Amino acid sequence: MDSYDTYDLTDEERELAALVRQFADEVVAPVSYEADRTHTLPMDVVAQMGELGLFGLPFPEEYGGQGGDYFALCLAIEALGRVDQSLAITLEAGVSLGAMPVFRFGTDDQKQELLPDLLAGTALAAFGLTEPEAGSDAGATRTTARRDGDEWVINGSKQFITNSGTDITRFVTVTAVTGETDGRKEISTIIVPHGTPGFTVERGYDKVGWRASDTHPLTFQDVRVPAANLLGTEGRGFANFLHILDEGRIAIAALATGAAEGCLDAAVDYAQKRTVFGDALSTRQGIQFLLARMQQRVHVARLAWHHAARLRDAGKPFKTQAAMAKLTASDAAMDNARDATQIFGGNGFMNEYPVARHYRDSKILEIGEGTNEVQLLVIARALGVA
């Protein structure tokens, strides 16, 4: 419910936020219910997101990007998250987990070959980190990659991998154990193109939320790729991913802020129109207090991710601020979804209303990109007590 004038945005940033918000209302929202119901990612909408330049926002123009920054990307993600978290996470993962690792750690050849299509939104890429036994403890990775001449031979499995099975998914970057030093695993990241023999994208999940988002388990059985598909320095894959994860937490915080605002907008509109005992529901002080709390959460969450994103773009340390933003915003999304559903009453339990979808979608915000318990650990370490 806040005006963009409430926040310290440039004219260009306000224009971008307004543009994507309009796109979300006019293009995304009308198809969201059916996409969620059928568990189908609307690829025509993804294509339009690409045409708007959203996938290229934080990348330089030399690779086909928009020459913007991470803050601009997060503005777009927030605007999408307000009406459809599945489309917002498609953008977030496509950039943060698909294109950004190539941009950050790829060779010049890898960047020139892979980035233009990813930044145009005509191709997607995924990042294969999580495994059945390696979620928050990503260092427990069991997938292996061994050198055999000029090739890597990969064996293992991944789970919960976003954007891994669409018609335009080009490749998956996989974390794999490539050696051991002093008893510790050396983890590297390797690009595995779709269609590589032995690489199988398994059937998509039947999820509680984010049901229009593309998410699959992956298996690798003697998958051979060229040695040149190594992304970054051998043995630095896990460390590099931690940096990517820190950035991603800001983007997830922006998505969660959008979701929290979407719940607030819907609840205010419903409370003003719904008549109870002859008066609008919004005249009840109990409802007013709920809505006020919801507004407070949106505002604080937005300030948190704004601060973290500004630090990141200024080249300053932002790890702790990203963790606090992700923690604050995901809690806000979940709390606002619960309160909005309560305000809607029985209607809030019906999937045709967006608050019901936000209620189902928002829980994963407290789990993905590092659980909220992990965020607390990051904050505690910054305090020197963990």
Image: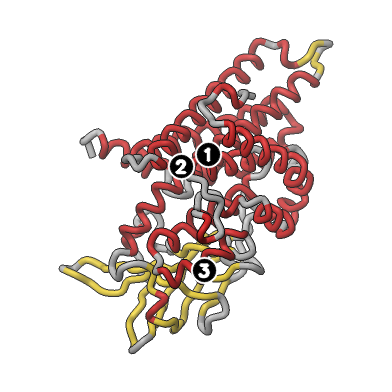
Q: If the image is split into quadrants, where does the C terminus sit?
A: top left
What is the C-alpha distance between the residues marked 3 and 2?
24 Å
The disc at residue 254 is 1
Of the image marks 3 and 2, the number of the one nearer the N terminus: 3
Provide the residue designation for mark 2: 250
| Residue farthest along the left direction in this orientation | 182
Is residue 122 or residue 209 the one in the foreground?
122
Provide the residue designation for mark 3: 114
Judged from the image, the secondary structure of the residue bearing numbered disc 2 is helix
Q: Position of residue 174 (x, y in %)?
A: 43, 68
Q: Position of residue 339 (x, y in %)?
A: 62, 27
Q: Given this view, does label 3 or label 2 mark the residue nearer the observer?
A: 3
Is residue 268 or residue 247 the one in the foreground?
247
The residue positioned 65% from the left and 31% from the top of the image is: 263
Quadrant of res 152 = bottom left
What is the C-alpha distance between the residues marked 3 and 1?
26 Å
Judged from the image, the secondary structure of the residue bearing numbered disc 1 is helix
For residue 187, say whether it is visible: yes
Q: Amino acid at mark 2?
A: Ile
Q: Is residue 330 left or right of residue 155?
A: right
Q: Position of residue 238 (x, y in %)?
A: 33, 61
The disc at residue 276 is none
Tell me: residue 358, above or below residue 114.
above
Q: Residues within 10 Å of mark 2 (few under 14, many from 20)?
A: many
What is the C-alpha distance between the residues marked 2 and 1?
6 Å
Is residue 139 or residue 312 the one in the foreground?
312
Of the image marks 3 and 1, the number of the one nearer the N terminus: 3
